[in-house]
Amino acid sequence: MSLSSSTAAGFRVGFSADFCGEDGQLAFPDIGLSLLKGVPGISHEFLREYRPEYVPSQLEGYDVLISLKPKVTAASLEGISRLCAIGRCGVGYDNVDLNACTEHGIAVYITPGGVVRPVAESILLLVLALSHRLLIKDRQVRAGHWAESTHRLGREPRDRVVGTIGMGNIATEAIRLLRTLDVGHFLAFDPYTTAERAKELGVELVSLDDLLRNSDYVLVNCPLTPETRGLVGKAQFALMKPDAVLINTARGPIVDEPALIEALQNQQIAGAALDVFEKEPLSKDSPLTAMDNVILTSHSIAWTEELFRDMGRIDCQGALAIYRGEAPQHVVNPKVLDSSKFLEKLGHFKAAFAALESKS
């Protein structure tokens, strides 16, 4: 079955090439394509070539781009005038130059509703895997060290302290799930949340230093911004309990990776679970790969059939909104909504959609 359903004319939606496998076929069971199929005047296709950073020739001729991993830079958009929106498959958008998009009248929207549950479940998974020394026990049994594996006692999250750096939707859902384990106390560091919201969630707002000093589990749940880059480094690891663990499912550069490696080697902290890294893919020579007390996943711990189904549907719904001449939801560069370039493109789509409706 061909994945391309493009035509030379009409409203065109492009999907980044990394939605497909090496055979050119869709790599995921469902990314919401059924929402686009059969809609008059809409065609979609998958970019044929994967590049870590888009080049303008890849983006020409599309009205909406739905993107997984590639970067969108100012250079990517040189000479691009038709593109009206970019749907990021996920909640992170540090790989998109928002200022350049705004300048070109391109709205960038994300898919928070599709991400929250699977990432929160992944945090729960990693808390339990570290607590019960799952990885170490598995390796020892495979190596024939049955008796030795029984001496590796774990510990339960029950009655312990969980601290989250960032208290957005993912952290909120993770806290809800972790409550089933009878966690003793929840701490949060988030300068952008309110005391009222923290109280409503049963979470104590504290400084970052206090969170690190008192938490048995430190969860990184904030976005990567200039403020959060390198937020957890050598000085912060020195504050943590020697039996505490760090779990990062957000973005790698929030944590100073060499400082984390040093803290683990010096037994300043007991372990870590990392789905994200300063540089991806992680080098096979990284000291992290040789550590039994570290769980490593490939920025995909939350990748489930449901994740891609829900993210894909949100992205396709955003494309349909543009097709009707409406702004999509979850736009992360809201200034573009008042941009003359964006409004001109949106007005064109609105008029075309109205003309189509009048004929039907």
Image (cartoon, rainbow, N blue to C red):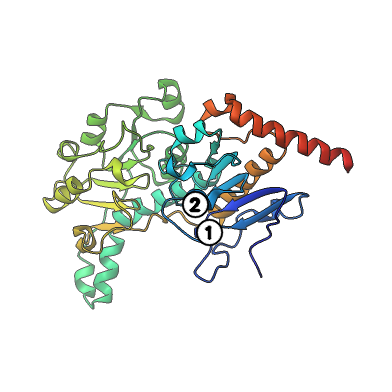
Residue 90 horizontal/vertical position (percent): 49, 46
Q: Is residue 281 left or right of residue 33?
A: left
Q: Residue furthest left?
A: 266
Quadrant of the frame with the C terminus: top right
Residue 173 horizontal/vertical position (percent): 47, 40
Residue appearing at x 70%, y 31% in the figure: 347
* Whether residue 194 is situated above or below residue 74 in the rendered picture: above
Do the CB atoms of the residues marked 1 and 2 lie less than 8 Å apart? yes
- For marks 1 and 2 on the same chain, the one whose residue lies earlier in the sequence: 1
Along the line of sight, which residue is nearer the eye, 278 or 222? 278
Q: Is residue 132 visible?
A: no
Q: Is residue 297 visible?
A: yes
Amino acid type shown at disc 1: Phe
**Quarter of the image holding residue 125?**
bottom left
Q: Is residue 72 left or right of residue 352?
A: left
Element on which disc 2 rests:
loop
* Whether residue 82 is situated above or below residue 198 in the rendered picture: below
**Residue 19 numbered mark, or none:** 1
Distance of label 1 from label 2 (alpha carbons): 7 Å
Residue 44 horizontal/vertical position (percent): 65, 54
Category of crowding for the residue at label 2, using alpha-carbon neighbours closer than 10 angstroms: few (below 14), some (14–19), many (at least 20): some
Residue highlighted by disc 2:
68
